[in-house]
Image (cartoon, grey):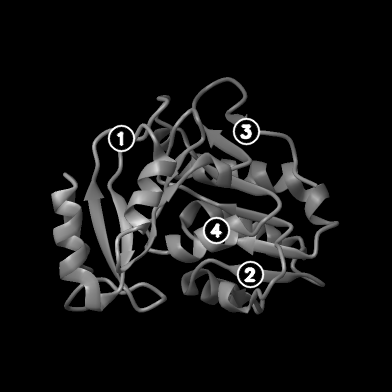
Amino acid sequence: MECFKELVGFYAFYLFRGLLENMERIGLGTGSTVKYFIKLFIKNDLYRGRELFVSSLDTYYFLRRYGVESYTVNELGNDLLDFYIDGFDEASINLDLVKGRGGAFNWEKKLASRSKLRIYIGDYTKFNNRTYLYLKLVPIEVKPDFLEEVVERVSKLGFQPKIRYGKVRDGPVLTDGGNYIVDLKLNIIGEPKKIDQVLKGIKGVVETGVFPNELVDHLLISGPFPGLVKIYSRRGFRE
C-alpha cells in the first residue's frame, strides 16, 4: 500500500509543478501520503522564495529537518493561500471527506477554507465509491472544560462518542491547539455539510473532521487500475 501513497504524491507533484512555480503561498497538509509530495517539493527547491504554511506541528518539524522554514495557520493573517495539498481518511464520489486520524483537522480545515486551490491525495482503499460517508469515525476537537458536556450532548443526538487516548502519554490526546479529540460513530453521513454545522453548533466543539466538498477542488486516487491514478474534480482550477 505504501507504493500507492508514494505514487500519488509523485503524480500530484509533477501534475501541479507548473502551477506551483508561479505561486507564492503554499499550504502543506499532514500525514504519510502528503509527505511524499513534500519531499519532492523540497528536493526540487520549490520552497525557495515562497511562504509555506503548515497544518500541524508535525509537518512544521518535518520541514525543519530539511532546513526549510514555515509558518502555522495562526501566522497567515488575512492573506489567502494559492495552493493547499493534503491527504484524507475517507472520500465519497461527491468529494466529501472525513479527515482527522492524525488529529490536525482543525488547522487543516482553516488552511483549506482560505486556499484558492485545494488538492487531496490518497490511495484507493480510502475512496468508498458511495455518495455518502460511512467508513471512518468522525473526530471532533473539544475544549477541555466542555468535554463531559459535549460527550453527553452528542450521545443524546444518537452518535457514539469515544474520547481519543494516545499511547505515549497518559490521558486524552492533545491537539496542537491544546484541545481534546472525541471520535464519533455516525453510521451513514448523507449530508456532510449539515452534520458539520450541527456538531459545530455544540458549545465547546472547536472543529469537526467532516470536510464538505466545498473545501475540495481535486481528488487524486492511486490504485491497481489502468493509468494508476484517477482524478476527480468538483470544478476547474480556481483563479
Q: Quadrant of residue 81?
A: bottom right
Q: Which comes before the other along the chain, label 3 or label 2?
A: 2
* Residue at (58% x, 62% y) in the render: 111
Q: Which comes before the other along the chain, label 3 or label 4?
A: 4
**Amino acid found under the numbered disc labelled 2:** Phe
Per the image, the residue denoted by label 3 is: 234
Measure the C-alpha gap from mark 3 to mark 4: 24 Å
117 to the left or right of 92: right
Q: Secondary structure at mark 2?
A: strand
Q: Which comes before the other along the chain, label 2 or label 1?
A: 2
**Amino acid found under the numbered disc labelled 4:** Lys
Above or below 158: residue 32: below
**Amino acid found under the numbered disc labelled 1:** Tyr
Q: Which mark is residue 18?
A: none
Q: Secondary structure at mark 4?
A: helix
* Residue at (74% x, 57% y) in the render: 82
Q: In the rendered view of the protein, which quadrant contains the N terminus?
A: top left
Per the image, the residue denoted by label 1 is: 134
Mark 4 or 1: in front is 1
Indicate the position of residue 180 as horizontal and vertical percent values. Answer: 28, 70
Q: CB of mark 3 within 8 Å of CB of mark 4?
A: no
Per the image, the residue denoted by label 4 is: 35
Q: Quadrant of residue 217?
A: top right
Per the image, the residue denoted by label 2 is: 53
Residue 35 in sight from this viewpoint: yes
108 to the left or right of 145: right
Task: Looking at the picture, tell me which residue is in the foreground, 43 or 200.
Answer: 200
Measure the C-alpha gap from mark 4 to mark 2: 14 Å
Q: Which comes before the other along the chain, label 1 or label 3?
A: 1
